[in-house]
Image (cartoon, grey):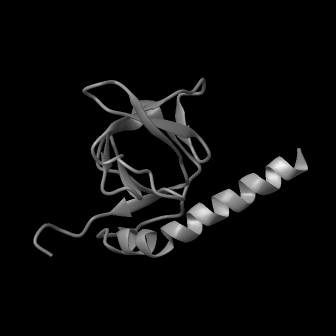
Amino acid sequence: MRSLFLLTAVALAGCAANDGPARQEALAAVPGKAVGEPVTCIQLRDVDRVEAVNDYVAFFHMRGSRMYRMDFPQSCRGLKNDAFRHSTSIAQYCRGDIITTFDTTTKMTTGSCGLSSFTPWELPPKGE
């Protein structure tokens, strides 16, 4: 069992290392600024829509004007073009939850991605 854990940890570290420069570039390309401390969970009922900015960043637009930025720990390949499912029994998106991406035409699963913390975010005014 310990060997399996170590093998998994090494494999995940390899994925993170491969994502490094691309992830940093994708994160830096997103406009705006943090306007509060990250939270670990947000209520599903308060989410109006989710916007995938790229394979590393998604905005969770809340009812009203609040928005959260969520940076994926590794690339969530295809998220920008696909949809995702989330299963929960507590009616929240939380850090550590897994979402499953799927092609909206074929309904076939295209991948799975882990969620991270949700940072309150503010976009710059239009035209800046």
* Residue 7 in view here: yes
Residue 13 in the figure: left or right of residue 39: right
In which quarter of the view is residue 73 placed?
A: bottom right
In the image as oriented, which residue stretches furthest toward the right? 2
Residue 21 placement (x, y as % from top left): 45, 76
User: Up-down: is 115 above or below 102?
Assistant: below
Residue 83 placement (x, y as % from top left): 33, 35
Residue 40 placement (x, y as % from top left): 59, 50
In which quarter of the view is residue 23 placed?
A: bottom left
Residue under the image location 50 percent in, 37 percent down: 99
Picture quarter with the N terminus: top right
Residue 101 in the figure: left or right of residue 114: left
Which residue is more in the foreground, 6 or 56? 6
Residue 32 in the figure: left or right of residue 125: right
User: Up-down: is 35 above or below 116?
Assistant: below
Residue under the image location 81 percent in, 50 percent down: 5
Which residue is more in the foreground, 2 or 73? 2
* Residue 67 in view here: no
Picture quarter with the C terminus: bottom left
